[in-house]
Image (tube, rainbow, N blue to C red):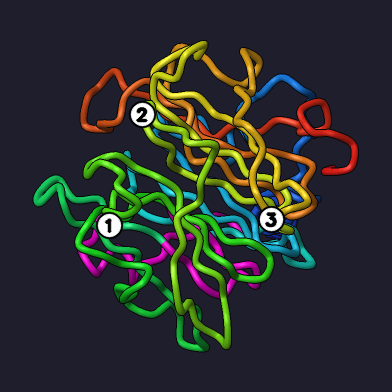
């Protein structure tokens, strides 16, 4: 009887010890959540870790901090909200929802990390009134993430501020339907707000060779502002509802003619939410078949693709 008891105790102890590595197993290890880098054909990012973790995923707007050690994205189905995961000595942490954004009762759209990973910017997705959306900011503190606050002018206006991305110098590029330069109300065009003296004192409309049809929105700026990817609606020669386009910053500060990124990236579905990786090697973007996650048939995934074949050598 005593030997049997000792065997049971030993077996329980062995099983408990064996379970420790399983419980302590990191979420992921290595750069870019340990994923095998893609080639020139876009593929789903981190399947089973970020995407495809629920039956009908609606994940979008994947963005990394400048050091590549913080990743942020949004989920509009299942456990909803803005999520963040960070690379530690033990590996990447399991994605955690930013509760202060959830508690603010705002429906976040287009979250974007600051270069230092200590701020999250997003727009408020409203159904009514359609004419008003602001850019919000949520900051990391020693006690957690702050309650989001709307940013004032010039980053907000009476119009809709739709999406934003941030360069390494904290200059903000965003889509807006604000009036200006005789552009029609309701269309989205791209604006930039330079970061000066720890603030954004002004916003300037970006002229993209008189791009008119459908406007341009959802800008994803390169860390050094040398190029930008944006989405546009129904431009001639497009592949679907919304496609991604590339423009290069020229030596005189103007932008090149927009170029469709082609069928290895664009499809008949909606491509939007571009983000450029901190090393400029990869483009992250969102592909979905509809905007409304409440509709059963809708799906949304975060994709990534290598940019080498899409950029001139001097821009890589």
Considering every residue shown, the one lying at the far left of the view is 128
Q: Earlier in the sequence, mark 1 or mark 2?
A: 1
Q: Given this view, does label 1 or label 2 mark the residue nearer the observer? A: 2
Q: Is the N terminus in the top left, top right, bottom left or bottom right quadrant?
A: bottom right
Considering every residue shown, the one lying at the far right of the view is 313
Question: Marks 1 and 2: CB-CB under 8 Å?
Answer: no
Q: In the picture shown, does residue 60 fall above or below 100?
A: above
> Is residue 11 in sight in this rendering?
no
In this view, the residue in front, 50 or 211, is: 211
Which residue appears at 43% of the width and 49% of the height? 74
> Is residue 191 in sight in this rendering?
yes
- Name the residue beneath numbered marker 1: 124
Q: Residues within 10 Å of mark 3 (few under 14, many from 20)?
A: some
Q: Position of residue 78 (x, y in %)?
A: 32, 41
Question: Marks 1 and 3: CB-CB under 8 Å?
Answer: no
Q: CA distance from mark 1 to mark 3?
A: 25 Å
Q: Given this view, does label 1 or label 3 mark the residue nearer the observer? A: 3
Q: Residues within 10 Å of mark 2 (few under 14, many from 20)?
A: some
Label ID, residue 37: none
Q: Earlier in the sequence, mark 1 or mark 3?
A: 1
Q: In the picture shown, does residue 21 fall above or below 240?
A: below
Which residue appears at 32% of the width and 74% of the height? 153
Q: Secondary structure at mark 1?
A: strand
Q: Which residues are magenta?
A: 93-121
In this view, the residue in front, 142 or 262, is: 262
- Name the residue beneath numbered marker 2: 214
- Name the residue beneath numbered marker 3: 225
């Amino acid at each position: 009887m005593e030997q049997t008891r000792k065997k049971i105790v030993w077996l329980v102890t062995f099983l408990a010890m064996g379970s420790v590595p399983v419980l302590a197993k990191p979420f992921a290890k290595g750069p870019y959540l340990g994923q095998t880098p893609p080639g020139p054909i876009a593929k789903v990012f981190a399947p089973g870790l970020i995407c495809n973790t629920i039956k009908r995923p609606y994940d979008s707007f994947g963005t990394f901090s400048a050091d590549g050690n913080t990743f942020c994205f949004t989920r509009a189905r299942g456990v909803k909200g803005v999520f963040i995961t960070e690379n530690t000595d033990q590996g990447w942490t399991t994605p955690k929802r930013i509760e202060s954004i959830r508690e603010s009762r705002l429906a976040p759209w287009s979250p974007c990390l600051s270069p230092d990973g200590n701020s999250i910017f997003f727009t408020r997705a409203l159904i009514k009134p359609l004419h008003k959306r602001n850019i919000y900011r949520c900051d990391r503190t020693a006690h957690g993430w702050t309650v989001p606050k709307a940013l004032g002018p010039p980053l907000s206006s009476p119009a809709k501020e739709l999406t934003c991305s941030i360069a390494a110098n904290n200059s903000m590029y965003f889509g807006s339907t604000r009036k200006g330069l005789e552009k029609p109300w309701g269309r989205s065009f791209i604006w930039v707000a330079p970061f000066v003296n720890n603030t954004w004192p002004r916003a300037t409309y970006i002229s993209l060779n008189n791009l008119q049809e459908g406007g341009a929105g959802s800008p994803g700026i390169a860390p050094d502002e040398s190029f930008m990817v944006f989405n546009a609606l129904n431009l001639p020669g497009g592949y679907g509802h919304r496609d991604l386009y590339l423009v290069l910053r020229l030596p005189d500060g103007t932008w090149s003619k927009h170029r469709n990124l082609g069928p290895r990236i664009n499809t008949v579905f909606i491509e939007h939410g571009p983000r450029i990786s901190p090393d400029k090697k990869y483009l992250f973007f969102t592909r979905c078949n509809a905007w409304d996650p409440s509709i059963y048939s809708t799906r949304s995934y975060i994709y990534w693709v290598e940019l080498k074949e899409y950029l001139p050598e001097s821009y890589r």
